[in-house]
Amino acid sequence: MTDLWPLAASALVFVGGHFLLSSTGLRGILISSIGERAYLGVYSLIAAISLIAMIRSYLTLPYGQPLWFLYPFGGYVAVIVMPVALLLVIAGYSQPNPTSIGQDRGLRRKPIGILRITRHPVMWGVALWAIVHLLANGDMSSLLFFGAFLVLTLGGTVAIDGKKARKFGSVYDGFREQTSNLPFLAIIRRRQSIGDAVREIGLWRLAIVVIAYGALLHLHRWVFGVSPYPGL
């Protein structure tokens, strides 16, 4: 268990640093003291260092005693769900999103594309990646590693909604009424159309998802030492 401390410590700094620096009164204090640009630099530096440390710690740890064993079910779920996670991340980064830093003006525009599915596409893409890898890897080191991303992303959607609502009031309330945090909920409630979402996401983004997914399947064993295919 002592081998897990570097991973646990870096995961704590990674998750805690994000919430502490971005979702508490410390954010305002730092911005007023050192300026927004310097604050963003400090925030990014802490996030990058803790992320690198967390990845290095996880990759050096052997697979430990399983806390749960869902083989091969977990592997099949990962293979099926990962294209959706990739779509959320790729479309989330390549389409305007008013929940992202510096894109607040988009709050007054009609949500399009991936925003019709969820207003936090990148967060949910990473969350799905973390969930399926937790299903496929049930040891303590995987729980700490992927669990850190899961807590950060799911908690981040709530924190972002809270910050935006306090800052923009009724404008953000209107944006929330047209969208949903939980993927596909706005479509299920008929606030949005899945057909419009797919059309606005576009074939070229879907093509990138297919290419990226194929590359991940092909390179997964070489990069991470584990086959993505259950039983192989």
Image (cartoon, rainbow, N blue to C red):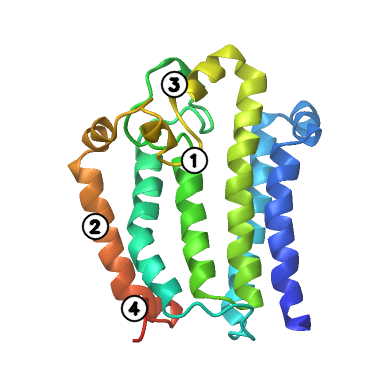
Q: Earlier in the sequence, mark 3 or mark 1?
A: 3
Of circles 4 and 1, which is in front?
1
| Snapshot quadrant of residue 163 | top right
Look at the numbered disc 2 and give the secondary structure of its residue: helix
Cβ–Cβ below 8 Å for labels 4 and 2? no
Amino acid type assigned to the residue bearing label 2 in the image: Val
The residue at the point 25 percent across, 32 percent down is 200
Task: Identify the mark at residue 106; answer none if there is no mark.
Answer: 3
Amino acid type assigned to the residue bearing label 4 in the image: Tyr
Amino acid type assigned to the residue bearing label 1 in the image: Leu
The residue at the point 40 percent across, 41 percent down is 93
User: What residue is shown with label 1?
Assistant: 182
The residue at the point 45 percent across, 50 percent down is 125
| Snapshot quadrant of residue 38 | top right
For this view, does 14 lie left or right of residue 212? Answer: right
The residue at the point 65 percent across, 29 percent down is 162
User: What residue is shown with label 4?
Assistant: 229
Of circles 3 and 1, which is in front?
1
Q: Is residue 143 above or below residue 30?
A: below
Cβ–Cβ below 8 Å for labels 2 and 3? no
Amino acid type assigned to the residue bearing label 3 in the image: Gly
Of circles 4 and 2, which is in front?
4
Look at the numbered disc 1 and give the secondary structure of its residue: loop
Q: Earlier in the sequence, mark 1 or mark 2?
A: 1
Residue in the foreground of this view, choosing between 181 and 188? 188
x%, y% of residue 111?
A: 38, 24
Of circles 1 and 2, which is in front?
1
Task: Identify the mark at residue 210; answer none if there is no mark.
Answer: 2
